Image (cartoon, rainbow, N blue to C red):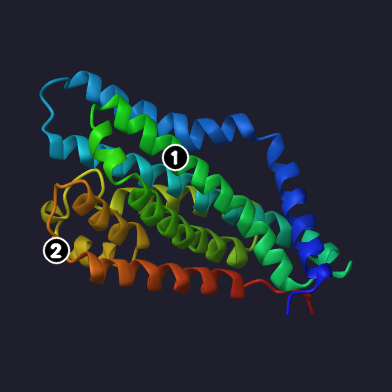
Amino acid sequence: MISKKSIKDTYFIMIMNLMSLRTAVVPYLVIAIILPLGFTYLVSLAFRDLIPIEAVVNMLIGVVVLSLSLSMINGIGQSIAQDRLLKRIELIASYPVSPASYVVGVSAVFLLSSILNILATIVAGGLAWGIADKVFAVFFELVGVSFIAGIGLMGVGAIIGTRSSNLPQAYAYTNIVSFLVAMLTPAYYPPEIMPVQLRYLSYVLPSTHASFIARNLLGVGSYDTTIHLILLVVLSIVYLVLGFKGIKWYQE
């Protein structure tokens, strides 16, 4: 049973993280939304009227994956690393706050930001590239699939944050991994053109299965969405559990 204290503790962690993110709003918006959208929009301008509909859909899926990867992996990974390595977790534990309240409170902040990322990139991308009719026809399905992928990527970031030995290492790994995930996910390009070895490697990423489903929803692919949805959910849960299990609440 959830107690009033657990709810208050979770709210306290949420507010604490929101306050710490307040000073980074502008960089966050630039990195997570403006940069991915701006890059792909410039590409679309360079090839205006020459891009087939499948390539436009690929750009939309790609920008959503890149936005989520940059925001979720970097955001949660660096936040947890800072809490661990600057000894904030020990301070929070001494209040006392339960590990569950900490996990839910931190997660809620970044899941909220992921919803904002998804809404902004899907709507802006659909309008900018002239496929708003396709996007809005399956809008809620796209948002749902993207949100589950965001949970999985948050787990990837948590794995880095809970296992980094110092802050520079955490910053470096989250930056590298976020771009690797975005590039290995067959989003900007169809999966069929990937080398076989890389294609198999990409299957361990929740964002890959989300991209398969998104292609089907937008009418440019024919994949078994049931299998990909199961893999998307399972991988997201696995990464999330692995990430947060690495938190040591009390240091010995």
Residue plotted at (58% across, 32% down): 27
Q: Quadrant of residue 89?
A: bottom right
Label 2 sits on what residue type?
A: Val
CA gap, disc 2 and disc 1: 33 Å
Q: Quadrant of the C terminus?
A: bottom right
Within-10-Å neighbours for mark 1: few <14, some 14–19, many 20+? some
Q: Secondary structure at mark 1?
A: helix
Q: Height in image: 3 above or below 148?
A: below
Residue 36: x %, y % from top left:
39, 34
Q: Is residue 111 left or right of residue 235?
A: right
Q: Which mark is residue 21?
A: none
Residue 197: x %, y % from top left:
18, 65
Residue 159: x %, y % from top left:
54, 66
Residue plotted at (30% across, 67% down): 229
Q: Secondary structure at mark 2?
A: helix
Q: Height in image: 38 above or below 2?
A: above
Task: Confirm whether residue 87 shows in the render.
Answer: no
Task: Confirm whether residue 163 shows in the render.
Answer: yes
Along the polypeptide, which appears first: circle 2 or circle 1?
1
Between 176 and 190, the one lying in front of the other is 190
Q: Quadrant of residue 250?
A: bottom right
Q: Height in image: 183 above or below 44?
A: below
Residue plotted at (74% across, 75% down): 2
Q: Height in image: 37 above or below 115?
A: above
Q: Quadrant of residue 134?
A: top left
Residue that badge 2 annotates: 196
Residue that badge 1 annotates: 119
Label 1 sits on what residue type?
A: Leu
Q: Which numbered mark, 2 or 1, is in the foreground of this view?
A: 1
Between 11 and 196, the one lying in front of the other is 11
Residue 9: x %, y % from top left:
80, 63
